[in-house]
Image (cartoon, rainbow, N blue to C red):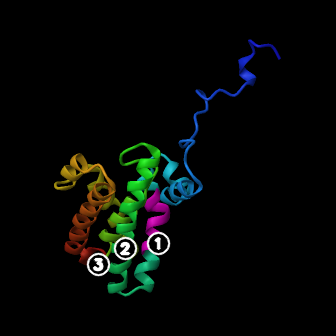
Amino acid sequence: MSESDSSAIPDETTNPPTQPSHVTGFGRLLLLVGSIGPLGHAPASGTVAVAVAGIPLCWLMRTYLDSTWYAVVTVVFAMASMALHQVGDRILGESDSRKLVWDELAGFFVAMAYAPLTWKAMVAGFFLERFIDIVKIPPANIIDKKMHNGVGVVLDDIVAGLYTALLLWIGQSWLV
């Protein structure tokens, strides 16, 4: 192989590492969990994560937990999401990284808290929550612009979940 044949030599500029080289084992585990494995690396990662992981998890939680325990698990999950996003974003050197998707699940769990447990409600909740989260209805837009930390990342999704929960409650007669 000659010195001019650079195609056989790996080049860091053509294959950059997927995460900073200084990430510890714990950091890698946190990023793996925060991205829900490959879901956080998919196009439209938040939507994919809610569709693939959020809907089944929500269905299981709503089926096997009473409303009090569902609320407790949702609040604990949201708080854990805030911590995970705070640390994960710092590791990745990003703000509100699309690779970390727990915020999307937290918002969806809030949206579905008191909706009827039917496939229609799940589908309506999925589309409504994703739309409202993307559009950023006030105060979510303000939170998104001003709070660049784990709390802000999750809080704008919680706001979308609350709006969705209200709409599902209003339309609950159509969702059963």
Taking the image as shown, residue 11 lies to the left or right of residue 154, namely: right
Rendered location of residue 34, percent (x, y)? 48, 58
In the displayed structure, 119 sits above or below 4; it is below
| Residue type, mark 1 in image | Leu
Location of residue 155 (image quadrant): bottom left
Residues at marks 2 and 3 touching, judged by CB atoms closer than 8 Å: no
Secondary structure of the magenta portion, mostly? helix
Residue count near mark 1 (Cα–Cα under 10 Å), binned few <14, some 14–19, many ≥20: some
Mark 1 lies on a secondary structure that is helix
Residue interval drawn in magenta: 49-58
Residue count near mark 3 (Cα–Cα under 10 Å), binned few <14, some 14–19, many ≥20: some
Q: Residue at x 31, y 52 (%)?
A: 149
Rendered location of residue 53, percent (x, y)? 49, 65
Query: Most extreme residue toward the left, as rendered?
Result: 138
Can residue 98 be seen at all in this image of the molecule? no
| Total count of labels | 3
In the displayed structure, 81 sits above or below 174; it is above
| Residue type, mark 3 in image | Tyr
What residue does disc 1 label? 57
What residue does disc 2 label? 76
Q: CA distance from mark 1 to mark 3?
A: 15 Å
Mark 3 lies on a secondary structure that is loop
Q: CA distance from mark 2 to mark 3?
A: 17 Å
Location of residue 108 (image quadrant): bottom left
Q: Residue at x 32, y 86 (%)?
A: 68
Rendered location of residue 62, percent (x, y)? 40, 80
Q: Mark 2 or mark 3: which is in front?
A: 2
Q: Going from the N terminus, do you reach mark 1 or mark 2 first?
A: 1
Q: Going from the N terminus, do you reach mark 1 or mark 3 first?
A: 1
Q: Quadrant of the N terminus?
A: top right
What residue does disc 3 label? 114
